Image (cartoon, rainbow, N blue to C red):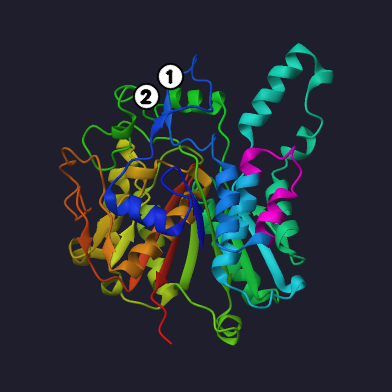
Amino acid sequence: MSVNTPLGDTLDGLEEALFAGRSAITRWRGVDTSRIYTKIGGDLTDYDFAKKIASLKARGDEAAANRFRALPKRLRWNVRLTALLALDAYADAAFETPPAAERFAAIVAGHNLNAGYTFSCFEKFTEDPDFIDPFIGLSVLDTTHAGIASEILGIRGPIHTVGAACASGNVALRSAIDEIRHHDVDAVLVLGAVIEFSPIELHSMALMGAVSFKSFNDEPERASRPFDVRREGFVAAQGGAALMLESLAHARARGARIYAEVLCVTASSDGNHQTQPSEDGQAALMVRALREAGIAPEQIDYINTHATSTPIGDLTEIRAIKRAFGAHAYALKLNATKSMLGHTCWASPTVETVASVLQMRAGRLHPSINIDQIEPEVDLDVCAGRVVDHPVRHVLKNSFGFGGINSVSILKVFDE
């Protein structure tokens, strides 16, 4: 696994920050907010690449540092972050012998990943079309992220992108399983790429009432507040993660350290393109995931919720969990990683899967922060403001995207 967020760019760093209950949300530094309502987010645009390269060298990975330094300077900063995520996940996987190139795949979760760059090119185009960056014709395709992963790791198997809005990371994980099961692939790198926001989509989401902008622009660390009565919308954030998925036979053959076993990833749609979450759709999919995983509801110990901090979305998910789990819902532990990280959008399922696995291995759950007054209908244990010691063998990860897209994954502790 690997991760890069404003809370930390290492697994240990992220884990420490989550258990400390720190917020990643600040005022935007890399987005011009002078003409838009929302001023806050999780910002990675000024990420210190030189410091990261130094850390690669310090851990003895001179080859990775050299591969990164050899990348073309014209690449966007978030594409360079994708390269680092790929290198870090590969290093964490500790391959003594690289996977066979033609049996090694990469899948990038997300779409419209370079919106900020496209916006800046449009501004230049309105002044003089001949002064735009000629590479925009390639960058808008988003395939650069997958191509860089392929280039930097020597991948010669299939590479592609998967777009499913805020469920993209889970759907990409589902596609990775299919590559292994049905397409003769040994290892798949699933990349939750970092999105580059532009003022246009941030302002449009404010006009829709989807993001926080009314009450907390001067207190950004308090803005992402799932399950709190004062929640007013999600907080857009930049962050990414990567998962190295392998067949069990391949992992065993090389003596790999196995973080967790993926029991299933399932998906559905609501038959409704509106930004309107469906309690029916979410509950039905959680039930289907349990059936596909072959486990009883009572075996789920913990749910990493989608919990974006929107008035409708948070309650819809809580109601769906109660319907899917019945009485066991009150024995479950839930928490909201977005309360600290904000909503990393297409990458959020991948980032939050990493957070879930870290908690599963630690045997404790991070707090859901900023719950000053819990929504009265939220009567489940959402780890409000506290770290909870809680053994976790099975975790369910919810991810629900705009356009009526639902995806649920279930992971478990691996038993030899």
83 in magenta: no
The residue type indicated by label 2 comes to Phe
65 in magenta: yes
* Magenta-colored span: 63-79
Residue on which the image places disc 2: 213
| Residue drawn at x 73%, y 59% as measured from the top left | 150
The residue type indicated by label 1 comes to Tyr
Q: Where's residue 369, x and y in %?
A: 25, 44
Q: Are the residues flagged by discs 1 and 2 in contact, CB closer than 8 Å?
A: yes
Q: Where's residue 199, x and y in %?
A: 54, 24
Examine the rendered structure and indicate whether residue 333 appears above or below residue 219: below
Residue on which the image places disc 1: 37
Quarter-wise, where is residue 191 in the image? bottom right
Estimate how packed mark 2 is, as few (under 14), some (14 to 19) or many (20 or more) residues with alpha carbons within 10 Å: many
Of 358 and 402, nearer the camera is: 358
Can residue 162 be seen at all in this image of the molecule? Answer: no
- Give how far apart the Cα atoms at labels 1 and 2 are: 6 Å
Callout 1: helix, strand or loop? Answer: loop
